[in-house]
Amino acid sequence: KKIFTYRGKTLEELQELTEKELAALFPARQRRVLLRGLSDAKKKLWKKIEKKDNVETHLRDMLVMPSMIGKTVKVYNGKEYVPVTLEGDMIGNYFGELVLTRKRVMHSAPGVGATRSSSHMSVK
């Protein structure tokens, strides 16, 4: 089985890093968020996720941190809480990137009155 690494560091090494050391590994946007400091709500959520599983949240702009790996978080998509099991390759992503807010458009047959020919189609 392939061992997970993020920028050359294993999951155990990542979990031991401080916020500043971790920020050095992240891309620019995520690095800026960590260096400026997480908001109180994000810090509170982080501690809550570390302690227990199945935490519900509206914070779609929260980063996936190494200490959250293996936990399940329910992220709000505007309608419902969608469960996401956090994995190693999600480190550095935002919760909002993992849960889509829009459904795919699925087109079926044209509606009644859509075209002149639709009056000859069966209504189901």
Image (tube, rainbow, N blue to C red):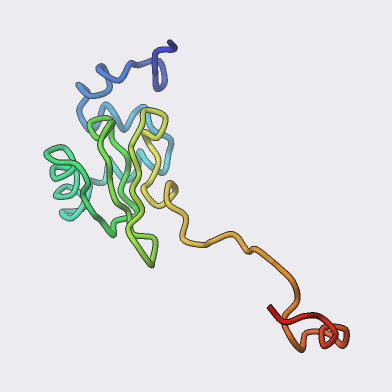
Position of the N terminus by quadrant: top left
Q: Residue 104, position in %: x, y?
A: 59, 59
Q: Which of the pair 101/64 is nearer the observer? A: 101
Determine whether 59 is above or below 5 in the image.
Answer: below
Residue drawn 75% across and 76% down?
110
Residue drawn 35% across and 63% down?
80
Q: Residue 62, position in %: x, y?
A: 30, 49
Q: Which of the pair 89/7 is nearer the observer? A: 89
Q: Residue 29, position in %: x, y?
A: 41, 44
Residue 123 position by quadrant: bottom right
Residue 119 position by quadrant: bottom right
Residue drawn 36% across and 28% down?
88
Q: Residue 15, position in %: x, y?
A: 23, 24
Q: Which of the pair 118/59 is nearer the observer? A: 118
Residue 93 position by quadrant: top left
Residue lying furthest top: 1
Q: Which of the pair 93/69 is nearer the observer? A: 69
Residue lying furthest right: 117
Position of the C terminus by quadrant: bottom right
* Left or right relative to 65: residue 100: right
Q: How many numbered tags mark residues here?
A: 0
* Left or right relative to 60: residue 41: left
Residue drawn 19% across and 21% down?
16
Determine whether 98 is above or below 120 in the image.
Answer: above
